[in-house]
């Protein structure tokens, strides 16, 4: 038996406009969110034609659960350093850090704690953060450490510098880190 879904066959530009207003998004923001051009959104909204395709399913989901868009929003970075903890191409956790004031803020985008940078911990300490960084690097006690640092062109053992060079990738591990300063 083939599965059937309760999804409209089409939507209109007025539907798009109402949803965009519900989500408090500009045309440009909505276009970025749905991976379309601003011009496409403008056309959808001004054109009286029926809109079909994958946008209809996305519309149905967002219309029923608009909070999904807010949950996926990247917050402004209020601290000096941002680290994206990734699993393959999926963002798991965004870690914002101010190392001088020893502040750490995280934003989890995955429900499964096994895929989060700090597991079930939602307010990690600065010490938790330092341990996490070290866990994504080779150990400071590694044999021939100086040769490895030289190979990476790093003057001394510093987890952030190592991660900038290696992306915190470990053998046969699909997690990695992206650093923004």
Image (cartoon, rainbow, N blue to C red):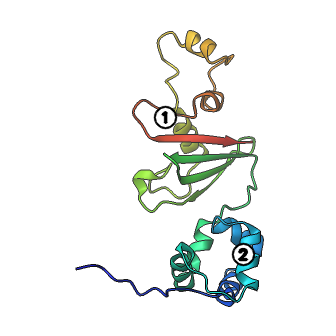
Q: Nearer the viewer, residue 124 or 81?
A: 81
Q: Work out which quarter of the rendered image holds the N terminus and state it.
A: bottom left
Question: Residue 72's x, y, as percent?
Answer: 59, 66
Q: Which residue is mark 2?
A: 41
Image location of residue 32, percent across then percent down:
69, 65
In the rendered view, would you say 160 is above or below 61?
Answer: above
State the residue position of label 1.
Answer: 135
Question: Where residue 178 sits: x, y (%)?
Answer: 62, 41
Q: Is residue 38 toward the left or the right of residue 59 in the image? A: right
Q: Is residue 100 above or below residue 113?
A: above
Q: Which of the 4 image quadrants contains residue 158?
A: top right
The foreground one among 162 and 65 is 65
* Residue at the (69%, 90%) spot, across then down: 14
Q: Residue at x 62, y 72 (%)?
A: 70
Q: CA distance from mark 2 to mark 1?
A: 44 Å
Asked whether residue 145 appears in the rendered view, the answer is: yes
Q: Which is closer to the viewer, label 2 or label 1?
A: 2
- Residue 120's disc number: none
Is 110 drawn above or below residue 38 in the view shown?
above
Q: Residue at x 27, y 79 (%)?
A: 2
Residue depicted at 49% across the width and 88% down the height:
8
x and y percent of residue 52 in the render?
56, 79
Residue 27 in the figure: left or right of residue 84? right
């Amino acid at each position: 038996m083939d599965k059937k879904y309760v999804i409209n066959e089409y939507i209109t530009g007025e539907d798009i406009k109402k949803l965009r207003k519900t989500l408090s998004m500009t045309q440009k923001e909505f276009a970025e969110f749905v991976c379309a051009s601003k011009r496409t959104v403008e056309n959808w909204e001004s054109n009286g034609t029926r809109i079909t395709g994958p946008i209809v399913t996305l519309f149905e989901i967002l219309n029923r659960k608009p909070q999904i868009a807010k949950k996926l929003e990247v917050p402004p970075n209020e601290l000096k350093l941002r680290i994206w903890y990734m699993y393959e191409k999926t963002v798991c956790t965004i870690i914002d850090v101010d190392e001088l004031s020893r502040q750490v803020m995280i934003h989890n985008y995955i429900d499964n704690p096994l895929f989060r940078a700090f597991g079930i911990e939602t307010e990690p300490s600065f010490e938790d953060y330092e341990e996490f960084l070290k866990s994504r690097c080779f150990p400071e006690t590694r044999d021939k450490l100086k040769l490895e640092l030289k190979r990476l062109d790093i003057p001394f053992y510093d987890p952030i510098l190592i991660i900038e060079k290696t992306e915190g990738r470990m053998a046969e591990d699909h997690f990695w880190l992206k650093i923004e300063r």
